[in-house]
Image: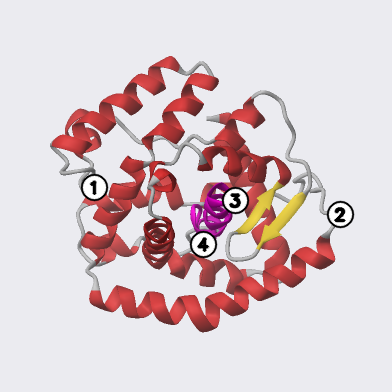
Amino acid sequence: MKIISIILISILFLLPDLSIAKDLQPDKAVEDGISDEYAAEDDEFYNFEEYEVEKNFREINDPIEPWNRLVFKFNDTFYTYAFKPAAKTYNAVVPEKARISVRNFFYNLAMPVRFVNDILQFRIKDAGIELTRFGVNSTLGIVGLFDVAEKKLDLKKHDEDLGQTLGSLGLGNGFYIVWPFLGPSSLRDTTGLVGDTFLAPINNISDDESVYTLNAYKYLNNGALRMEDYDDLKESAIDPYTAFKDAYFQYRQEQIKK
């Protein structure tokens, strides 16, 4: 029962759905005078301008589109009337630098997911960098709150998960799925997420309540950092459902290529 609960809470909270929105505005970190370190960090993982939808982008397999649109509408309503007000309050109370440090902490903690998938893809150098980053940031970076490895050693972040590993082995996306709260995904990436769940240290905590609380807080903090991106993409799209779907698949395609 606990394993099932962990998988369900991970599907809800491990990957913030706001991260598929592209940056259409200048980086807020730069405008607010925050250091280039934090601005560069945001750009590396959340700037989706380079993944702008191309007119000739291949048709995406979406056999359950009516259901997906219904879930997309549910997610949008949840975002507008529940998440966004909560995130605005959170942003007003917690400084941006502190929120970025919290994001760094959770990213550092998820090292096993990236390390194992580096090994599975035979990316031995990247696996070594991942271990080095973890060691440096866990000590000099104060349990991962600060990215000393990138700032001082130029060891940059890279994102790896089981969905990317399966894609690199030639497994196709399967069909498109929109999950409640999670947002855009695919059959392949959903399978990968379930596998990654068992590697995430947070989900191996013995106290179920702590697992749910930490995942929920991670979801709130990461989403609050980038919630403007969701609004930008939605407002600029003729059909927001299609825009998010295309942006998601192009983003994942680029991740697999790296």
- Mark 2: amino acid: Pro
| Badge 2 element | loop
Q: In the rendered structure, does residue 18 fall within the stretch colored magenta? A: yes
- Mark 1: amino acid: Glu
The location of residue 201, given as percent across then percent down, is 39, 41
Q: Is residue 187 above or below residue 232?
A: above
Q: Report the residue marked by disc 4.
A: 18
User: Distance of mark 3 from mark 4, alpha carbons?
Assistant: 25 Å
Residue 4 numbered tag: 3
Query: Which mark sits nearer the N-terminus, 4 or 2?
Result: 4
Name the residue at 47% across, 24% down.
118
Q: Is residue 156 left or right of residue 16?
A: left
Main SS of the magenta segment?
A: helix
Q: Is residue 58 left or right of residue 118?
A: right
| Badge 3 element | helix
Residue 63 numbered tag: 2
Q: Which residues are magenta?
A: 1-20
Total label count?
Answer: 4
User: Distance of mark 2 from mark 1, alpha carbons?
Assistant: 42 Å
The location of residue 152, given as percent across then percent down, is 16, 33
Name the residue at 33% across, 80% down.
89
Q: Report the residue marked by disc 1.
A: 37
Name the residue at 23% across, 29% down.
135
